């Protein structure tokens, strides 16, 4: 048994974060409407403005955190670390500079560290939400952080 990693389980009911840059909010709302029957089976959260707009336009219940530029990306990242977000749908705008780009990069990095699926456009979101894994538990391995911290503290 390799104790450098631990196995975590993403349950059948996923905790999905929904995020979109301003120029992509309409696309994400349309995607949510098209996938409403699937999304209603899961817990949804998102950054403030996006969450509010999705709820207002689709009727889907989306728990809102702060707006991205006001720390919402960081709040979502913290929920990933806590094991409370299983899946991120982030329609990003690659053609427009974002004032909170470091926060976005930090969110994407923490999702990678914790082996969380990330869809950053409609095609990847479609592939992921229609995957067989959306209807079942999924086990994945992440770094054994307690072991890692213990070893680092002994060597520094």
Image (spheres, helix red, strand yellow):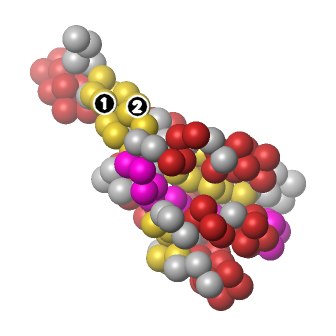
Residue closer to the observer: 27 or 12? 12
**Which residue ends up furthest to the top in the rendered image?**
1
Residue 82 within the segment the image draws in magenta: no
How far apart marks 2 and 1 lie (CA) works out to 6 Å
Q: Secondary structure at mark 2?
A: strand
Q: What residue appears at the point 33 percent right and 50 percent down from the top-left corner?
A: 83
Q: Check the picture and name the quadrant holding the N terminus.
A: top left
In the figure, is residue 19 to the left or right of 124? Answer: left
N-terminal label among 2 and 1: 1
In the figure, is residue 154 to the left or right of 77? Answer: left
Is residue 135 in view? Answer: yes
Q: Is residue 155 above or below residue 109?
A: above
Q: Is residue 50 above or below residue 14?
A: below
Residues packed near mark 2 inside 10 Å, few (<14), some (14 to 19) or many (20 plus): some
| Disc 2: which residue | 140
| Disc 1: which residue | 7
Q: What residue appears at the point 42 percent right and 50 percent down from the top-left corner?
A: 12
Write the start and end of the magenta stretch as one range: 11-27
Contact between marks 2 and 1 (CB within 8 A): the answer is yes
């Amino acid at each position: 048994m390799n104790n450098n990693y631990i196995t975590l389980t993403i349950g059948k009911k996923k905790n999905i974060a929904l995020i979109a840059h301003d120029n992509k909010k309409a696309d994400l709302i349309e995607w949510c409407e098209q996938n409403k029957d699937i999304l209603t089976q899961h817990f949804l959260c998102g950054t403030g403005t996006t969450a509010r707009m999705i709820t207002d336009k689709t009727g889907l219940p989306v728990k809102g955190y702060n707006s991205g530029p006001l720390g919402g990306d960081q709040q979502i990242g913290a929920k990933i670390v806590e094991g409370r977000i299983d899946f991120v749908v982030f329609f990003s705008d690659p053609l427009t500079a974002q004032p909170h780009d470091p926060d976005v990069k930090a969110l994407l990095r923490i999702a990678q560290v914790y082996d969380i699926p990330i869809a950053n456009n409609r095609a990847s979101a479609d592939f992921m939400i229609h995957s067989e894994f959306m209807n079942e538990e999924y086990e994945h391995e992440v770094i054994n952080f307690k072991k890692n911290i213990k070893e680092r503290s002994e060597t520094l």
